[in-house]
Amino acid sequence: MSTTRIEVFDDADALSRAVAGELLARLEAAQAGGGSPQVALTGGSIAERIHAALGEAGPRSEVDWGRVVVWWGDERFVAPDSAERNALDARRSFLDRVGVPDAHVHEVAATDTTATVGDAAAAYAEAIREHGSGAFEVVMLGIGPDGHCASLFPGHPALDVADAITVAVRESPKPPPERVSLTFEALNRSRAVWFVASGEEKAEAVARALADDGDLHETPARGVTGLPDVDGSPTEVVWFLDRPAASRL
């Protein structure tokens, strides 16, 4: 079974620095054990702060960035230079600054190279089969005010996709309408699942996600809890919150 802990920080800046520090420490530890850790990043405003903190502290860390492999939990199916792409900020603020090799950065295909969102989802799943390690070291996720995570939205058919790594999300309730997301099955294949949330507008969704009872169809973030058989040890689930986001716990 997974183990869950909640960490609360005074504000978004303190939260971002703490998450960046814990990620660097986790990567260093994995590499000290001989691993080449694979991580799945997220998008959103708090992720941008975390990327900036990683871009600042990462070059001074002991992480061998040539041995880190990067994925995304979800991506918007838009043009490659669109500000809506999660990968754009991560590359500029973090990955390019620390020197992760381009061959180790696995983005979802954009509209300039792939005809449909279904094709993009299929190609991303194939890339994970070819280059994935079987389990992420860390999956980082945000949570929306509606309780969604990655691009898995309340009541959406994508929530019930099984036996698949990725899903093409069409008619997303939040623009842009087409996205590619990892499925619950893929997101749960992780040694650590880290949720990050900032702001009072997230407080109700955070409380629902952490409640003893609830339906993942109403609060999809409830569906990412890790799996007990990842490397034979329980998945660590951590909620990194600032005080406003934790205000209803």
Image (cartoon, helix red, strand yellow):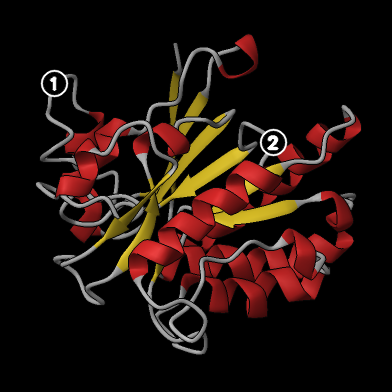
Residue shown at 53%/25% (left/top)?
236
The image quarter containing residue 56 is: bottom right
Q: Can residue 125 be seen in this view?
A: yes
Q: Is mark 1 on a helix, strand or loop?
A: loop
The numbered disc on residue 95 is none
Q: Which residue is drawn at 36% across and 33% down?
A: 224
Please, what is the three-letter code of the amino acid marked with disc 1? Asp
Give me the residue at 23% from left, 35% from top: 209
Res 133 label: 2
Closer to the camera, 70 or 170?
170
Separation (CA) of disc 1 from disc 2: 33 Å
Coordinates of residue 35 in the picture (x, y in percent): 83, 34
Q: In this view, does 174 lie above or below 61?
A: below
Q: Which amino acid, by three-letter code, is at mark 2?
A: Ser
Q: Give left or right: position of 31 versus 87.
A: right
The 10 Å Cα crowd at callout 1, few under 14, some 14 to 19, many 20 or more, is few
Q: Earlier in the sequence, mark 1 or mark 2?
A: 2
Q: Which residue is drawn at 45% across and 55% down?
A: 122
The kind of secondary structure element at disc 2 is loop
Name the residue nearer the viewer: 85 or 222.
Answer: 85
Location of residue 82 by image quarter: bottom left
* Classed neighbour count for the residue bearing mark 2: other residues with Cα under 10 Å, few (<14), some (14–19), many (≥20): few
Looking at the rendered image, the disc whose residue lies closer to the viewer, 1 or 2, is: 2
Residue 15 visible at all: no
Q: Position of residue 117 (x, y in %)?
A: 35, 68
Q: Pinpoint residue 222: horizontal percent, then vertical percent.
A: 26, 33
Q: Can you identify the residue that label 1 sits on?
A: 213
Foreground pick, 94 / 76: 76
Q: Quadrant where the C terminus lies?
A: top left
